Amino acid sequence: MSLELLNTLYVQTQGADLRLEEDSVRVRLPEATARRVLPLRRIDAIVVYGHVNLSTELITRCAQDARSITWMSGGGRFLGRLDGAVRGNVLLRQAQHRALADESVSLEIARNVVAGKIRNSRWIILRTARDAAPPAREEMRTVAATLAEKIDTVASAADVDTLRGIEGDSARLHFAAFRHALRPADGIPPFERRVRRPPTDPVNALLSYLYGMVRGMVHGAAEQVGLDPYVGYLHGIRPAKPGLVLDLMEEFRPVLADRLALTLLNRRQLRAEHFEELAGGAVQLTEDGRAVVIREWQEARQQLWEHGLAGRSVPAGLLPVMQARLLARHLRGDLPGYLPWKVTA
């Protein structure tokens, strides 16, 4: 296994306390007499959910070692990330800004981002359509055919706003087909449409949680390569919005997040009791539900996927790093364009 894909420590028990103990992390859970000590050398990242305490010494040590710490809300919403001192080549960041200022270069990167997302969305729809009932299967194949037409229109999109419209239409088509692929357990209402901020049903709650996981992984990849996470081409630049992270995660959403959601729900690994409704109507995973998702997410990160440009299989957890490097090579002038990852398995 690559050194770049070590272990991530996920902590979601509310009130847990993490402290530095020489070269280890000491984890103490509330109402538990035992404590757990994990060697830092075996951990490449820490992700905490909700109310989890980290000592200043541990945060400082992680910053010094460039070991990332990611804070998520209890419901799985990305809140922030620590990655130590700014890394990377300032010339790469300068090239990233020059590309944003050049409308033709910026538009071409955004086109490839959208095309990559639609291609991978179409792949998962066609793959899941094989197991659907005949009426749903035909509808899913019709959606896949429409998405193929959308890919053709991406190449001729005259500006980023047009691209955003194509991406939005494609996402609606994707989720219209996605609902036919779901066979959730009793007690989980049928998925109708994508709802976020906040999600108001179990399927949307699961999707939002998984998108948060993908976002955290892609954010880390961008920083690892030395790119500015906040300079995007499809999502542009806005205060406190990591535009590049949102760009790069588009191609991974269908395969790494939506596919895992289908698996967890269709195999009944997540059931109605793994979700809870909050005051105001928002729905989120329970602590037991999050534990199931985190366990399966860790497994999914190890799964090998073929990477056409690399000519070899790559663990899912490394795909964002490879794509960030491809973008960096394009920005430096080593590649004629940014090539999104296209699933071929």
Image (cartoon, rainbow, N blue to C red):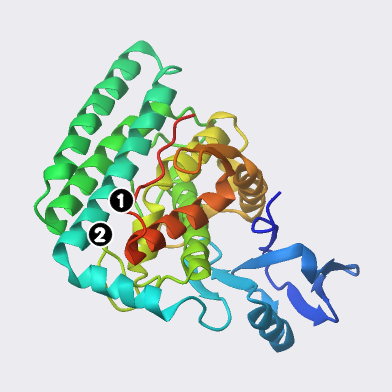
Considering the numbered disc 1 on the image, is that residue within a helix, a strand or a loop?
A: helix
The quadrant where residue 231 appears: bottom left
Closer to the camera, 86 or 177? 86
Instruction: Tell me: residue 194, above or below residue 104.
Output: above
Compared across the picture, whether 37 is left or right of 62 comes to right
Residue 198 in sight: no
Q: Are marks 1 and 2 in contact (CB under 8 Å)?
A: yes
Other-residue count near label 1 (Cα within 10 Å), few / some / many at <14 / 14–19 / ≥20 = many
Which residue carries the number 1 mark?
A: 113
Residue 338 at x, y = what percent?
33, 53
Residue 145 at x, y = what percent?
23, 25
Which residue lies most toward the front here? Answer: 334
Q: Amino acid at mark 2?
A: Leu
Which residue lies most toward the right here? Answer: 34
- Distance from disc 1 to disc 2, alpha carbons, whole Å, reads 8 Å
Q: Which residue shows up at 63% across the image and 68% down it?
A: 48
Compared across the picture, whether 16 is left or right of 338 comes to right
Residue 51 at x, y = what percent?
62, 73
Residue 234 numbered tag: 2
The quadrant where residue 198 appears: bottom left
Which residue lies most toward the top here? Answer: 134
Residue 192 numbered tag: none
Instruction: Tell me: residue 96, above or below residue 234.
Output: below
Q: Amino acid at mark 1?
A: Val
Compared across the picture, whether 194 is left or right of 104 comes to right
The quadrant where residue 181 appears: top left
Q: Which residue shows up at 49% across the image and 48% down it?
A: 206
**Mark toward the start of the polypeptide (1 vs 2):** 1
Other-residue count near label 2 (Cα within 10 Å), few / some / many at <14 / 14–19 / ≥20 = many
Residue 23 at x, y = what percent?
83, 77
